[in-house]
Amino acid sequence: MSTALAGPLAGAAHVRPDGWLATPLTTDRAQAEAQARSLIQRRHPAAPGPVRCLTARYHTATFTLGDPPRQLLKRHGDEAAYLGEVLAYQLLDTDKVLPQLRSTCDTTRTLVADFLDAPAGIDHTDGFEKLIATVATIHTAPARWPQVIADTMAPWRLATTVDNPGPGWIRDVTAWRRLLQLTAGAHGEDHVPLGHLDLKANHCRRRPDGHLALIDAETLRPDLTGLPDLITLAHLGQTEGRNLSPRTVRHVPSVQQRTRRPVERCRPCERADRVRRRHRPALPPRRRTMTVRRTRAQRHSQRHDLHRGP
């Protein structure tokens, strides 16, 4: 059974019942390690050895590769969770907010990424501001997508999802819909909400290039609003002795549009289609919306109102 949420979001979601996964993985560490060695030989031959089991759960298993560890192998028992994680790596590849993805295998639902052992301390002002900037980079990623990806991710736009009945795991659908409305007020109805990052101090690691990265991307799903991340971020800041104050928020970089050459079809687009078909409920037809271009002063005013509260 999945673990219930703790902390400021306790009680926000239903806990999955026992037996929800039709093909669970072994929880025996020795057996899981033997299976991983076989999978690596057949599917990830370039991965270094030796293989050491870190965790063996019925839904996921993780293994370090190399001595000292240089890469991490992750195996999923649930196909939708695997597709969602790989999609997150691909959509955020150029933003350098996750470990570097090395290889994937859809058949075995395994992926290999860099192993990040160096912690990124957030118990000081600069560290916490970098964490805020990392979260902001993830939340605003859709504003920088090329048109081909934006079109593929359209079923998850706020204009479409706000009228849905709500996911079955949400206890308070009215509150969930209110979150979507608040997000739409800040970003616009064409925004695709990315978030639900499971923010913890030990999930903040340092990439070889010096960037702060979050090592848990499994829960980054395009059907979840990122506003709970702000609640968790404020709670984490208080735990680490930092406050989410207007002075700190000022340092979050503004959204910069990036020009990328469009392509006919790309892997993130194909991955998004598969996630939608296999994991998400059917969505209503895309409705027409008008994009409102707001001035910088208007955007600043709205952000100030959100920070100030009612």
Image (cartoon, rainbow, N blue to C red):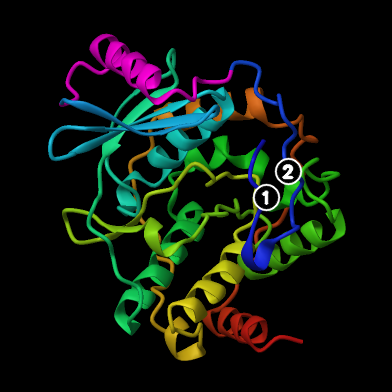
Can you say which quadrant of the picture contains the C terminus?
bottom right
Label 2: which secondary element: loop
Residue 153 in the image: above or below residue 289: above
Q: Position of residue 299 (x, y in %)?
A: 58, 78
Q: Which mark is residue 15?
A: 2
Q: Is the Cβ of the residue at disc 2 closer than 8 Å to that at disc 1?
A: yes
Above or below: residue 231 compared with residue 24: below
Quadrant in the picture for the N terminus: top right
Judge by depth and name the residue closer to the eye, 258 or 160: 160
Identify which residue, 8 or 179, lies in the foreground.
8
Across and down, in percent, residue 223 comes to 65, 45
- In-front residue for pair 221/262: 221
**Is residue 288 something one can see in this rendering?**
no
Identify the magenta region: 24-48
Q: Which residue, given by chain and number where applicable, does mark 1 sit on?
A: 4
Q: For mark 1, does the 10 Å Cα neighbourhood hold few (<14), some (14 to 19), or many (20 or more) residues?
A: few
